Image: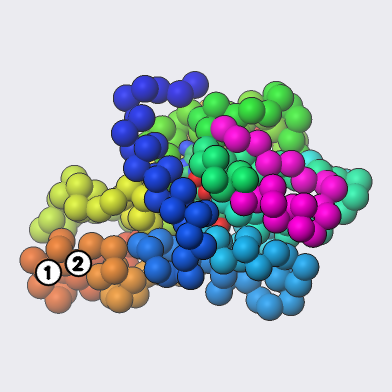
Amino acid sequence: MRNPQFEPIHLTVKETYRQVALNQESCCSISDCCGSMLYDAGALQGIPVDAVQASRGCGNPQAIAALMPGEVVLDLGSGGGIDVFMAAQQVGETGYVYGVDMTEEMIALARRNAELIGATNVAFRHGMIEQLPIDSHHVDVIISNCVIKLTPDKSAAFAEAFRVLRTGGRLAISDVVIDGVLHDLPVSEAEIRASLNWAGCVAGALTTTELVRLLSDVGFVDVRVEMQSHYTVGDLYGQMPATLANLDAATVRELVGRFGSANIHARKL
Ligand SMILES: C[S@@+](CC[C@H](N)C(=O)[O-])C[C@H]1O[C@@H](n2cnc3c(N)ncnc32)[C@H](O)[C@@H]1O
């Protein structure tokens, strides 16, 4: 269910991705997690250039989801559709892939991309991941690429993911997370988050412990968070230059090791 108190954050995030969809900025031209380098050239064969250009992921969720022909997949926050199209190739004509995104311009871009390649086993639906426009018990696999960190209501998003999954379904998502805790640093977690734009990579990231707890709370089992990479000093300076300017080099090094990309797995029994 959507909570009106989160509306300002949703509007900030939406405006950022509206600009990405409209302007087709090249990767890294906005403060984000830039996705196209996450996929090797072979995997991008047959994927529309505009979907690659609009890509803003931080992982490769369909690569970790072990998709099988015939499966029904849902991509939370599908953007220009890159992961939907890649998943569609894996599930084949007997499978189906839905993408849900709250930004109208992203949905329009993804639908144009689908038309361009004549994809018949995909559908893009406009909506919120906190209130999915998808029937209950309809989906085998949920994927998502760098989107959970953008929602201020992660419990609602996870509860919806659980609702739409079939019994035995699985979740395989990539996201930015905090590896460890932030409360033992000279700068407080609240200060770090307040200095950041919600549409960027870090402001809304969960700790790995919080992720496991929130997913378990809504009913998921076998929850696993696997760190894939940690931010470099340069990555972090790109995200929070003002905060880092006030810290000594040792603290900056400490902070850098605590942010990174993770693969997150869970199952619905
Ligand atoms: C970082 S981009 C990732 C897009 C795509 N997954 C990719 O890898 O290129 C985030 C996308 O999620 C969408 N989004 C963010 N928060 C959302 C929410 N609460 N509900 C639905 N879509 C959301 C944005 O509109 C944007 O298209």
Residue drawn at x 76%, y 72% as measured from the top left: 45
The x and y percentages for residue 148 are: 47, 45
Residue named by callout 1: 245
Residue named by callout 2: 241
Q: Which residues are magenta?
A: 109-127
User: In screen coordinates, is 83 left or right of 204?
Assistant: right
Q: In the displayed structure, would residue 150 be above or below residue 131?
A: below
Circle 1 packing at 10 Å, graded few (<14), some (14-19), many (20+), is few
For mark 2, give the secondary structure. helix
Instruction: Give yes or no for contact between labels 1 and 2 (Cβ–Cβ under 8 Å).
Output: yes
- Determine the CA span between mark 1 and mark 2: 6 Å
Q: In the displayed structure, would residue 164 be above or below residue 124?
A: above
Residue 110 sits inside the magenta stretch: yes
The x and y percentages for residue 201 are: 38, 57
Residue 241 can be seen in this image: yes
The x and y percentages for residue 198 are: 33, 47
